[in-house]
Image: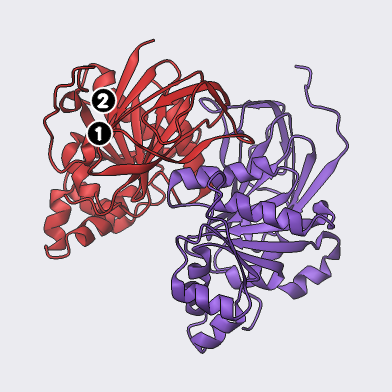
Chain colours: A red, B purple
Amino acid sequence: MEVMWHASSFLLPQPQPQEPREDAPPPPPAALTYALIVLNQRLPRFAPLLWNRAQLRVCADGGANRVYDDMPKLFPDQDPQEVRLRYTPDVIKGDLDSIRDDVKEFYLNLGVRIVDESHDQDTTDLHKCVAYVSGSAPVEDKSKLCILVVGALGGRFDHEIGNINVLHRFSNLRIVLLSDDCLIHLLPKTHSHVIHVQLPVEGPHCGLIPIGAPSARTSTTGLQWNLSDTAMSFGGLISTSNVVKEDKVTVSSDADLIWTISIKKPIKE
Amino acid sequence: MVSRLVQNTKVMKHAATFLLPSSAVSATNRLAQTYALVVLNQQIPKFTPLLWSHAKLRICADGGANRIFDGVPKLFPDQNQLNIQHRYVPNVIKGDMDSIRPEVHQFYAELGSEIIDNSENQDTNDLHKCISFIREQTSAFDHSNFCTLVTGALGGRFDHEAANLNALYVFSDMRIVLLSDDCQIRLLPKTHQHEIHIQSTIEGPHCGLFPIGGPSVSTTTTGLTWDLCNSEMKFGSMISTSNKVREEKVTVCSDADLLWTISLKTPIHMGLTC
């Protein structure tokens, strides 16, 4: 089974050189192209860090309000308008029923592309943005694209679950949902997984959750409570409040799993 | 397609009467229930005093005690803060005791809260422990008329949230409702057909149905804007999010356990003087 590598190097203050490992080639974090999608929740404190990593920045509807209002708050010593000019999205997309008029006008005047998709009620804002990013991102090999999303967790529960379902619907893409407290991403059953834990910025709390379908057999290494051909399901065992014990975690499962790991505070930019 | 639904005449009724003031609940006696309240370690919703007034048993899970101690007085800013703290004393504080602040621990212990230290048991999370405790205390009760309300189960670390959702499945024979300022969540077990009576002054219209434990081959609903009709639902494909309640009674019948969620309107009138 093919191996898929994961590393949250987008949370590191600057690209770190990877130590060559004897047992396996290092993941190519520098070779990943990042895109950022901002949904309509308060920005996490490390949003500027993600913004600077990304080559494409998309706001989903009211996410534009959040960038407009919250980015200046993350730089309280700086002039708010200067901050806004520095953190201008490439595209604003979605129903456009949440974006404020003043925010819309501000970004229109800066030449930001605003795409009204209120005619399409079948998919969520995140779904539309992921489809757009996947089609537009400046990278030919989609396995080298990583889509970072803020504002997908918390708030209305049906929105959160709809956002998690986007991970399942686009299971061939790397999509990471981030909040102040944690990040989550899918580990598709089509691959075995190696997660290089970035200990300065993430962990130790972690979990593996079989959302959508149970797992008959999951095995891990590198965790405090490893699984060994263990069955997981809602109503039975799911792996929560686990702890990373090594900086390399491996996961292999017959089911799609959600991997979650806590984010350390504070993350300095 | 032949429906694969089990022909099941058992109906389970649901109503968020715990969000109505006590006077309104007695007027709708047929849905009155006995409540327990579990407070987990996240910011309490603004209507927590209303839930507290309905509950016969109030349990704080570890740092949930800090949340009551700090958070309830802030909901009554014009009142004497210490008086408020004296009025909202949990019956039980249970858990690892690694989050509760020493002064909060002492305050409630002196006022008679039963403190149950579970730090030796690391196998289940705080919510599971509290629900097990409630189950032991209430074995004499008719479970169909008993309901456990939980605050602080959502948000924060995602693995905590998942463990809290799992509690609904693990204890699927008990009525448990997870509540936040934005929404409520319940399990609709596949063993029953469900009738959900919507209190439209306080909840809706946004709602959803999710098969997080496993796919549904056939789910049928009435009363929603986008009703399901023997519809398949699974992650990776269609699940019912951003739906809306259209009628005062919603029915759900499925071959799979489903999570039901409905948004809460703000503000919820507290309907009480403290």
Amino acid at pointer 1: Ala
x, y (%) of residue B153? 54, 53
In depth, the one of B241 and A194 nearer the eye is A194
Q: Which residue is mark 1?
A: A35
Q: Are marks 1 and 2 in contact (CB under 8 Å)?
A: yes
Specify the farthest residue to the front. Answer: B120
Q: Chain of mark 2?
A: A
Mark 2 packing: few (<14 Cα in 10 Å), some, or many (20+)? many
User: Do callouts 1 and 2 point to residues on the same chain?
Assistant: yes
x, y (%) of residue B122? 53, 47
Mark 1 packing: few (<14 Cα in 10 Å), some, or many (20+)? many
Seen in the picture, residue A41 relative to A59 is either above or below; the reply is below
- In the rendered structure, the answer to whether residue B45 lies left or right of residue A94 reads right
Q: Secondary structure at mark 1?
A: strand
x, y (%) of residue B119? 52, 55
Q: Secondary structure at mark 2?
A: strand
Seen in the picture, residue B187 relative to A128 is either above or below; the reply is below
Q: In the image, what residue occupies the spot 75% across and 55% down?
A: B136
Specify the farthest residue to the right. Answer: B9
The circle on residue A145 is: 2
Seen in the picture, residue B150 relative to B234 is either above or below; the reply is below
Amino acid at pointer 2: Leu
